[in-house]
Image: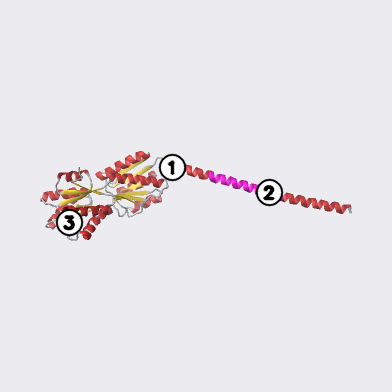
C-alpha cells in the first residue's frame, strides 16, 4: 500500500511539473513574439524615417536639366533661356541647353545625349509637333521625365507649358474687328506655320473668331511659311498678286510678319499687319506707325520660369497640371512704348 501511495504521489508530481513546464514554454514564446513585434515596429519606424529623410535630402540636391530649344537664334527662345538660367541659379541647378536649329534629327540626338548623361529631367521645345513622341518615349524608358514648352508634342510629357495660342489668335481677330475693319467687312489673309501645332492653333483662333463674329470679313488666303522669313516674303508677294485687295494679314510669328512687311512695302500696298510674338523688331515697327499695327505678345520669361517650377514640383513628388497656359496680350501704338 505504501508503495502504491508513493507511486501515485510521484505520478502527480510529474504531471504537475509537466504542466508548469508547458506553461513556462508558452509564456516564453509569447514574450519572444512580443519582443520581435516591437523590434519589427521599431525597424519599420526607423526605415520610414530614413525614407522621409532621403526624400527631404533629394529636395535639396542639385539637379541637371537637359534643354533642347527649337532655335536659339530666335529672340523668343533667347528670352526663355535667360529666364530658365535665372530660375535654375535660384534652385542651385545646372542647365545643359542645346540648340536644335530647327532640325528634328539633331534634336533627337540631343535627347539621346541627355539620356546618356542621366540628367534629372529633359525639356523639349519640339522642332515639329508630329514625330516628337519618339523622344519622349526614349526618355520614359530611361526613367527621365520630359517636359515640353511652347510647341506641343504628339507624345505625352509630364507637363506642357505654352502661350494660350488659340486665345492669341482670337485677340488678333478681335483687334481686326475693333480697330481695322470696324464695319466688319473686308478681306483678311493668314501666313501660318503648318508644321507647328501652336501656330496652327493661332491660325484657328483667328479664323474661327472671324467666322463666328464677323462673317463678312472674308479669309481670302491662307499660306504656310514653314518658319522661313524669306519664304514669308514670297508668300505675301504671291498673296498680293492673287488678290486685288487684302486689308489685313495675320502672321502667326514675327519672322513671318517681317517677311510680309518687306513685300507689302515693295508693292506699295496698304495691307495692315498683325504679328505674333512681341519681339523687339515688331514693337519697333509698331512705334513707326506704318503697316505693322499690332502684335500678339507672348511671355517667354513666364514660360521658362513656369517650366522649371513644374519640374521642381514633379521631382519633389508633387502633382503638376498636364498643361500650363500663359495668357497673351495685344501690343499696339497705345502701349508699344
Kindly check if marks 2 and 3 are in contact, taking CB atoms under 8 A apart as contact. no
Number of the label disc, if any, that sits on residue 188: 3
Q: Which residue occupies 42% across, 40% down? A: 60
C-alpha span from label 1 to label 3: 54 Å
Instruction: Name which of mark 1 and mark 3 comes first in the sequence.
Output: 1
Kindly check if marks 1 and 3 are in contact, taking CB atoms under 8 A apart as contact. no
Instruction: Name which of mark 2 and mark 1 comes first in the sequence.
Output: 2
C-alpha span from label 2 to label 3: 93 Å
Q: Which one is in front in this view, the residue at disc 1 or the one at disc 3? A: 3
The crowding category of the residue bearing disc 1, from other C-alpha atoms within 10 Å (few below 14, some 14 to 19, many at least 20), is few
Number of the label disc, if any, that sits on residue 27: 2
Residue 198: % across, % down: 27, 53
Number of the label disc, if any, that sits on residue 58: 1
Q: Is residue 33 left or right of residue 317?
A: right
Residue 85: % across, % down: 32, 40
Kindly check if marks 2 and 1 are in contact, taking CB atoms under 8 A apart as contact. no
Towards the viewer: 203 or 214? 214
Give the residue at the far left of this rendering: 268
Give the residue at the far right of this rendering: 1
Number of the label disc, if any, that sits on residue 302: none
Amino acid at each position: 500500500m505504501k508503495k502504491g501511495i508513493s507511486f501515485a504521489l510521484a505520478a502527480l508530481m510529474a504531471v504537475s511539473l509537466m504542466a508548469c513546464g508547458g506553461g513556462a514554454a508558452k509564456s516564453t514564446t509569447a514574450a519572444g513574439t512580443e519582443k520581435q513585434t516591437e523590434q519589427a515596429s521599431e525597424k519599420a519606424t526607423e526605415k520610414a524615417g530614413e525614407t522621409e529623410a532621403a526624400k527631404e535630402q533629394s529636395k535639396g540636391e542639385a539637379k541637371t536639366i537637359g534643354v533642347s530649344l527649337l532655335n536659339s537664334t530666335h529672340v523668343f527662345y533667347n528670352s526663355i533661356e535667360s529666364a530658365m538660367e535665372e530660375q535654375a541659379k535660384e534652385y542651385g541647378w545646372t542647365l545643359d541647353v542645346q540648340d536644335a536649329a530647327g532640325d528634328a534629327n539633331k534634336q533627337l540626338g540631343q535627347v539621346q545625349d541627355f539620356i546618356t548623361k542621366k540628367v534629372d529631367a529633359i525639356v523639349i521645345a519640339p522642332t515639329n509637333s508630329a514625330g516628337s513622341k519618339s523622344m519622349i518615349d526614349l526618355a520614359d524608358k530611361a526613367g527621365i521625365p520630359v517636359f515640353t514648352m511652347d510647341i506641343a508634342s504628339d507624345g505625352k510629357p509630364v507637363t506642357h507649358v505654352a502661350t494660350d495660342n488659340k486665345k492669341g489668335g482670337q485677340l488678333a481677330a478681335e483687334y481686326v474687328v475693333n480697330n481695322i475693319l470696324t464695319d466688319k467687312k473686308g478681306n483678311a489673309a493668314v501666313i501660318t506655320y503648318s508644321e507647328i501645332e501652336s501656330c496652327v492653333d493661332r491660325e484657328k483662333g483667328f479664323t474661327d473668331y472671324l467666322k463666328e463674329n464677323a462673317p463678312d470679313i472674308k479669309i481670302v488666303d491662307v499660306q504656310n511659311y514653314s518658319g522661313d522669313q524669306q519664304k514669308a516674303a514670297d508668300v505675301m508677294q504671291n498673296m498680293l498678286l492673287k488678290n486685288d485687295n487684302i486689308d489685313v494679314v495675320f502672321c502667326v510669328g514675327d519672322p513671318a510678319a517681317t517677311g510680309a512687311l518687306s513685300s507689302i512695302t515693295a508693292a506699295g500696298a496698304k495691307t495692315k499687319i498683325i504679328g505674333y510674338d512681341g519681339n523687339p523688331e515688331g514693337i519697333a515697327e509698331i512705334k513707326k506707325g506704318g503697316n505693322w499695327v499690332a502684335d500678339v505678345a507672348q511671355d517667354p520669361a513666364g514660360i521658362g520660369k513656369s517650366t522649371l517650377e513644374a519640374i521642381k514640383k514633379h521631382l519633389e513628388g508633387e502633382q503638376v497640371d498636364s498643361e500650363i497656359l500663359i495668357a497673351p496680350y495685344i501690343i499696339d501704338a497705345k502701349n508699344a512704348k
